[in-house]
Amino acid sequence: MHGPPLIGWLLVALCAATGGYCLLRMRAEPPGAARRSARAEALMGWGMAAMAVPSAVLDPRPWGPPAFAAVFGVAAVRAMGHHHLHHAVGALAMVYMALAMMAGPRGGHSHASMAAGGIPVLTGALLVYFAVYVVRSGLRLLPMTDGAVTAVGWSRLPELRHACRLTMAIGMFAMLLSL
Protein backbone atom coordinates (compact mmCIF):
# COMPACT_ATOMS: atom_id res chain seq x y z
CA MET A 1 0.00 0.00 0.00
CA HIS A 2 1.12 3.49 -0.71
CA GLY A 3 0.81 6.32 1.74
CA PRO A 4 1.73 6.60 5.41
CA PRO A 5 2.91 3.27 6.88
CA LEU A 6 0.79 3.77 10.02
CA ILE A 7 -2.37 3.92 7.91
CA GLY A 8 -1.26 0.79 6.06
CA TRP A 9 -0.67 -1.16 9.28
CA LEU A 10 -3.98 -0.01 10.75
CA LEU A 11 -5.73 -1.21 7.59
CA VAL A 12 -3.85 -4.52 7.76
CA ALA A 13 -4.97 -5.06 11.37
CA LEU A 14 -8.56 -3.98 10.71
CA CYS A 15 -8.98 -6.05 7.55
CA ALA A 16 -7.24 -9.14 8.96
CA ALA A 17 -9.40 -9.05 12.09
CA THR A 18 -12.52 -8.64 9.97
CA GLY A 19 -11.44 -11.48 7.69
CA GLY A 20 -10.82 -13.66 10.75
CA TYR A 21 -14.28 -12.92 12.13
CA CYS A 22 -15.78 -13.79 8.74
CA LEU A 23 -13.94 -17.12 8.78
CA LEU A 24 -15.41 -17.89 12.20
CA ARG A 25 -18.84 -16.86 10.95
CA MET A 26 -18.41 -19.09 7.91
CA ARG A 27 -17.72 -22.10 10.13
CA ALA A 28 -20.84 -21.38 12.20
CA GLU A 29 -23.18 -21.06 9.21
CA PRO A 30 -24.95 -24.05 7.66
CA PRO A 31 -24.10 -24.71 4.00
CA GLY A 32 -25.85 -22.26 1.71
CA ALA A 33 -25.99 -18.58 0.85
CA ALA A 34 -24.95 -17.31 4.29
CA ARG A 35 -21.82 -19.47 4.28
CA ARG A 36 -20.91 -18.35 0.74
CA SER A 37 -21.36 -14.73 1.78
CA ALA A 38 -19.14 -15.18 4.84
CA ARG A 39 -16.51 -16.95 2.71
CA ALA A 40 -16.51 -14.09 0.18
CA GLU A 41 -16.21 -11.53 2.97
CA ALA A 42 -13.33 -13.48 4.56
CA LEU A 43 -11.51 -13.55 1.22
CA MET A 44 -12.09 -9.83 0.82
CA GLY A 45 -10.85 -9.06 4.33
CA TRP A 46 -7.68 -11.11 4.01
CA GLY A 47 -7.04 -9.85 0.48
CA MET A 48 -7.43 -6.26 1.61
CA ALA A 49 -5.06 -6.93 4.51
CA ALA A 50 -2.45 -8.38 2.16
CA MET A 51 -2.82 -5.51 -0.28
CA ALA A 52 -2.60 -2.90 2.51
CA VAL A 53 0.83 -4.02 3.77
CA PRO A 54 3.06 -0.94 3.43
CA SER A 55 5.25 -1.15 0.34
CA ALA A 56 8.34 -0.35 2.43
CA VAL A 57 7.88 -3.74 4.11
CA LEU A 58 6.69 -5.84 1.19
CA ASP A 59 6.72 -4.82 -2.44
CA PRO A 60 4.54 -7.45 -4.14
CA ARG A 61 5.54 -6.49 -7.66
CA PRO A 62 5.86 -8.17 -10.08
CA TRP A 63 3.97 -11.23 -8.78
CA GLY A 64 1.41 -9.61 -6.45
CA PRO A 65 -0.77 -7.46 -8.70
CA PRO A 66 -1.45 -10.20 -11.28
CA ALA A 67 -2.21 -12.66 -8.46
CA PHE A 68 -4.59 -10.20 -6.76
CA ALA A 69 -6.27 -9.43 -10.10
CA ALA A 70 -6.74 -13.13 -10.89
CA VAL A 71 -8.07 -14.10 -7.44
CA PHE A 72 -10.47 -11.19 -7.19
CA GLY A 73 -11.51 -11.50 -10.85
CA VAL A 74 -12.66 -15.05 -10.09
CA ALA A 75 -14.33 -13.81 -6.89
CA ALA A 76 -16.19 -11.14 -8.88
CA VAL A 77 -17.48 -13.69 -11.39
CA ARG A 78 -18.62 -15.98 -8.55
CA ALA A 79 -20.34 -13.08 -6.78
CA MET A 80 -22.18 -12.10 -9.96
CA GLY A 81 -23.20 -15.72 -10.45
CA HIS A 82 -24.74 -15.74 -6.96
CA HIS A 83 -26.35 -12.30 -7.46
CA HIS A 84 -24.27 -10.55 -4.78
CA LEU A 85 -23.78 -7.14 -6.35
CA HIS A 86 -21.87 -5.62 -3.42
CA HIS A 87 -19.42 -8.51 -3.31
CA ALA A 88 -18.92 -8.19 -7.07
CA VAL A 89 -18.30 -4.43 -6.81
CA GLY A 90 -15.82 -4.99 -3.98
CA ALA A 91 -13.97 -7.71 -5.88
CA LEU A 92 -13.86 -5.59 -9.03
CA ALA A 93 -12.53 -2.67 -6.97
CA MET A 94 -9.74 -4.97 -5.77
CA VAL A 95 -9.00 -5.95 -9.38
CA TYR A 96 -8.91 -2.25 -10.30
CA MET A 97 -6.47 -1.47 -7.47
CA ALA A 98 -4.27 -4.43 -8.45
CA LEU A 99 -4.17 -3.19 -12.06
CA ALA A 100 -3.32 0.29 -10.79
CA MET A 101 -0.46 -1.27 -8.79
CA MET A 102 0.85 -2.85 -12.01
CA ALA A 103 0.63 0.47 -13.85
CA GLY A 104 2.68 2.28 -11.19
CA PRO A 105 6.40 2.86 -11.64
CA ARG A 106 8.80 0.14 -10.50
CA GLY A 107 11.00 2.43 -8.46
CA GLY A 108 9.11 4.97 -6.37
CA HIS A 109 6.14 4.23 -4.19
CA SER A 110 4.92 7.69 -3.32
CA HIS A 111 1.26 8.59 -3.33
CA ALA A 112 1.83 11.07 -6.18
CA SER A 113 3.48 8.47 -8.42
CA MET A 114 0.63 6.02 -7.92
CA ALA A 115 -2.06 8.58 -8.78
CA ALA A 116 -1.16 8.15 -12.43
CA GLY A 117 -2.01 4.43 -12.18
CA GLY A 118 -5.71 4.97 -11.60
CA ILE A 119 -8.52 6.46 -13.63
CA PRO A 120 -9.81 9.46 -11.64
CA VAL A 121 -13.45 9.09 -12.73
CA LEU A 122 -13.54 5.39 -11.86
CA THR A 123 -11.76 5.97 -8.56
CA GLY A 124 -14.25 8.73 -7.76
CA ALA A 125 -17.23 6.53 -8.61
CA LEU A 126 -15.89 3.75 -6.37
CA LEU A 127 -15.26 6.24 -3.56
CA VAL A 128 -18.86 7.48 -3.82
CA TYR A 129 -20.18 3.90 -3.86
CA PHE A 130 -18.24 2.89 -0.75
CA ALA A 131 -19.04 6.16 1.05
CA VAL A 132 -22.77 5.59 0.50
CA TYR A 133 -22.37 1.96 1.54
CA VAL A 134 -20.60 3.03 4.75
CA VAL A 135 -23.40 5.43 5.67
CA ARG A 136 -26.07 2.86 4.83
CA SER A 137 -24.31 0.14 6.82
CA GLY A 138 -23.77 2.50 9.73
CA LEU A 139 -27.50 3.21 9.84
CA ARG A 140 -28.18 -0.54 10.03
CA LEU A 141 -26.24 -0.66 13.29
CA LEU A 142 -28.71 1.66 15.00
CA PRO A 143 -30.94 -0.25 17.41
CA MET A 144 -34.21 -1.19 15.74
CA THR A 145 -35.61 -3.45 18.45
CA ASP A 146 -37.26 -2.95 21.80
CA GLY A 147 -34.13 -4.21 23.54
CA ALA A 148 -35.17 -7.85 23.78
CA VAL A 149 -32.19 -10.21 23.84
CA THR A 150 -32.35 -13.33 21.74
CA ALA A 151 -30.39 -16.51 22.28
CA VAL A 152 -28.18 -16.37 19.19
CA GLY A 153 -24.51 -17.33 19.14
CA TRP A 154 -22.08 -14.40 18.98
CA SER A 155 -20.89 -15.35 15.50
CA ARG A 156 -24.42 -15.09 14.08
CA LEU A 157 -25.45 -11.73 15.53
CA PRO A 158 -26.74 -9.53 12.71
CA GLU A 159 -25.06 -6.48 14.25
CA LEU A 160 -21.65 -8.10 13.92
CA ARG A 161 -22.36 -9.08 10.32
CA HIS A 162 -23.26 -5.46 9.51
CA ALA A 163 -20.24 -4.17 11.46
CA CYS A 164 -18.04 -6.53 9.46
CA ARG A 165 -19.35 -5.17 6.17
CA LEU A 166 -19.08 -1.60 7.45
CA THR A 167 -15.46 -2.18 8.46
CA MET A 168 -14.51 -3.58 5.07
CA ALA A 169 -16.25 -0.75 3.24
CA ILE A 170 -14.32 1.79 5.34
CA GLY A 171 -11.11 -0.08 4.57
CA MET A 172 -11.89 -0.15 0.86
CA PHE A 173 -12.62 3.58 0.94
CA ALA A 174 -9.26 4.25 2.63
CA MET A 175 -7.41 2.04 0.14
CA LEU A 176 -9.01 3.82 -2.79
CA LEU A 177 -8.02 7.17 -1.30
CA SER A 178 -4.40 6.06 -1.19
CA LEU A 179 -4.43 4.84 -4.79
Image (cartoon, helix red, strand yellow):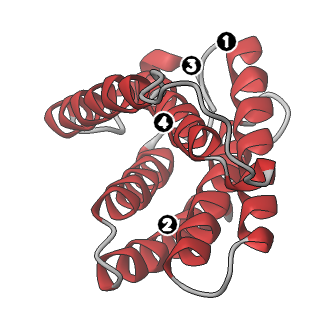
* Sequence-wise first label, 1 or 3: 1
Q: Residues within 10 Å of mark 2 (few under 14, many from 20)?
A: many
Disc number for residue 172: 4
Q: Where on the picture, by quarter, is residue 139?
A: top left
Q: Mark 3 or mark 4: which is in front?
A: 4
SS at mark 4 in the image:
helix
Residue 60 seen in this snapshot = no
Determine the CA span between mark 2 and mark 1.
24 Å
Quadrant of image for the N terminus: top right
Give the labeled residue for mark 3: 110
Give the labeled residue for mark 2: 69
> Amino acid type of disc 2?
Ala
SS at mark 3 in the image:
loop
Residue 148 vs residue 119, the one in the foreground: 148
Residue 106 vs residue 157, the one in the foreground: 157
Give the labeled residue for mark 1: 4
* Sequence-wise first label, 2 or 1: 1
**Residue, x 71% and y 43% (percent of image)?**
18
> Amino acid type of disc 4?
Met
83 displayed left or right of 4: left
**Looking at the picture, how far across and down is residue 53, in whole percent?**
75, 36
26 displayed left or right of 130: right
* Sequence-wise first label, 1 or 4: 1
> Amino acid type of disc 3?
Ser
